[in-house]
Amino acid sequence: MNHLPSWNDGPSKDAILDFVARVSHGDSPDFVPVSERIACFDNDGTLWCEFPMQTQVFFAFAQLANIVEKSPDLKEKQPYKAFLEHDTATIHALGKKAVFEFAFATHAGMTVDEFADIARSWFETARNPKLDRLFVKCVYQPQVELLALLRENGFKTFIVSGGGIDLIRAFAELAYGIPPEQVVGSSVKTAFEAAGKLVSLRKLAELRSFDDREEKVVNIGLHIGRRPIFVFGNSDGDLAMMRYALAGQGPRLAMLVHHDDAEREFAYDRDFKLSPLTEALDNAAAYGIRVVSMARDRKEVFVA
Amino acid sequence: MNHLPSWNDGPSKDAILDFVARVSHGDSPDFVPVSERIACFDNDGTLWCEFPMQTQVFFAFAQLANIVEKSPDLKEKQPYKAFLEHDTATIHALGKKAVFEFAFATHAGMTVDEFADIARSWFETARNPKLDRLFVKCVYQPQVELLALLRENGFKTFIVSGGGIDLIRAFAELAYGIPPEQVVGSSVKTAFEAAGKLVSLRKLAELRSFDDREEKVVNIGLHIGRRPIFVFGNSDGDLAMMRYALAGQGPRLAMLVHHDDAEREFAYDRDFKLSPLTEALDNAAAYGIRVVSMARDRKEVFVA
């Protein structure tokens, strides 16, 4: 059978196929019971494109338009101004946490059901301006094949992302086959509201968890309650969960996407302020993390 | 086929079988896609016995013995004294949240892996003193059959409990077939720790979430991200999630165990200070919640 057809032959593909075979064959010394086959994937930059900014930020642009219509005085205030003008340099300079926290706050006041409707309808037409593709078509075909291969071999696949948990849930089942309850992400606090037969959860402006770096491991503990045996990421924000996986007993695999393909996608690492790749790249070998090259390892980049 | 053999024939059993058939038959007007078949169960008093105190409290007794060995001056302090003396009246008077928060704090300083080992080993011999049964044998046989029936019909079954998430995870897969990632519960904050090849999560003394009442709905939003279509509880602490389920569109079922079987188990409701059943019982009909009688509806009570 031709597994992973959009991956080029080479050490990355071999490492995946070898790992999956070792943990899933009953007579393998590295056999892992199905219930322990937990795989965690970062989303932005790992399962889909995150350049020039994460989709979360583009979604915030759209939400802000509604907000400043009601409060026009915000138009000249930062960071509203930068978001409204799609001022990439100013936004990047804020750093990932500040940008995401601001983006999440644009949803305050909606119920989670209202948010899901808005997000799903936005995804129908919203496009990455640099690639001129629908965001939902900026998903990486090789990763969709990898997710399927893992699930065929008894793995449960999770997203563990710095992105907003509800935004990812609005498209992850269709795009990746990952249901809402297997999405871990950043989140704001919510409030229970009941008025007669209307019972809902309302999103508040206050951050509950920014799911990045060490917090990814904390949230894996909270949501999953087991140590993953497979982790795939692409930035320093994923290093802690890679180390957590690798520190467990038995077979482990941690992979790191390196965006080195300016021709078909983008080439960036250390200087990408919204999600730098520095420490994880410099220490990959020492930690036992395999670096996957977008340029060399991928036959296809995006889903059709 | 004889479904639910440990349930007596009657309206409760009929309601379950009817609901499951309506949502899962492709030609039913009430058909619900598999991905939306989310069922949430409270644990203490719903899936297993919670009397005279929740298992969480008995587990804390055992942990406290270790703590006061190191700090003997605590022996005379409250609530240590009450826990050490198994002083039910004093413990009940504290109320559920205070008791559970104190119980959770006895695990502070352990890694989640250490905690899991201690809990699993405790469950091997720990017994409910009133029933003189192993705690893991205080699981209700009719509910184990119901969980299996739901899963056979495409439901994903979750626990949503005020109990500590890690304690439930230590036995739920074996007892109920519910894996750790489908357990939602109360939790303390944890800290990521890395020292060379040792990478772990350490439990802190600070509460993250007390998963009771409205907070159960908040945590369903966080962990599951969908509105359940089936909820089973036994106390006022489950009313909010029942209302949340019932407020959704399409077929819904919410059931409430009433502990009215002093002969085979225990009879209690309003006066059980650690988890009273008052508002949910008084308003069950108004909310459309079905009350299940332990005495009338159950042929068998406990697992063999």
Image (cartoon, coloured by chain):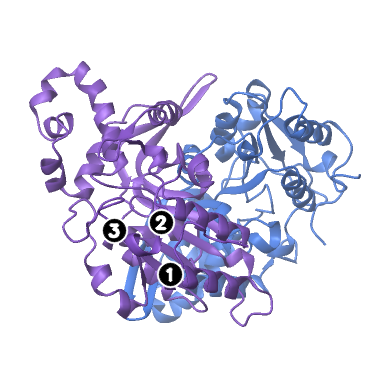
Chain colours: A blue, B purple
Image position of A156 (left or right of A62):
right
CB under 8 Å between discs 2 and 3: no
Quadrant location of the C terminus of chain A in the rendered image: bottom right
Q: Do circles 3 and 1 both sit on a common chain?
A: yes
Front residue of this view, candidates B20 and A182: B20
Q: Which residue is mark 1?
A: B12
Residue shown at the point (14%, 30%) measured from the top left:
B85
Q: Nearer the viewer, mark 1 or mark 2?
A: 1
Q: Secondary structure at mark 3?
A: loop
Residue A224, can we see it? no
Residue A142 sits above or below residue B115 on the image: below
How many residues crowd around disc 1 within 10 Å: few (fewer than 14), some, or many (20 or more)?
Answer: some
Residue B81, can we see it? yes
Q: Which residue is mark 2?
A: B219
Q: Which numbered disc flags the more N-terminal residue, 2 or 3?
A: 2
Q: Secondary structure at mark 2?
A: helix
Location of residue B130 in the rendering, given as x and y in whole percent from the top left corner? 25, 40
Q: Which residue is mark 3?
A: B259
Between the residue at mark 1 and the residue at mark 2, the CA separation in whole angstroms equals: 28 Å
**Three-letter code, disc 2:** Asn
Location of residue A170 in the rendering, given as x and y in whole percent from the top left corner? 59, 65
**Three-letter code, disc 3:** His
For mark 1, name the chain.
B
Image position of A292 (left or right of A99):
right
Front residue of this view, candidates B300 and A174: B300
Residue B103 sits above or below residue B41 on the image: above
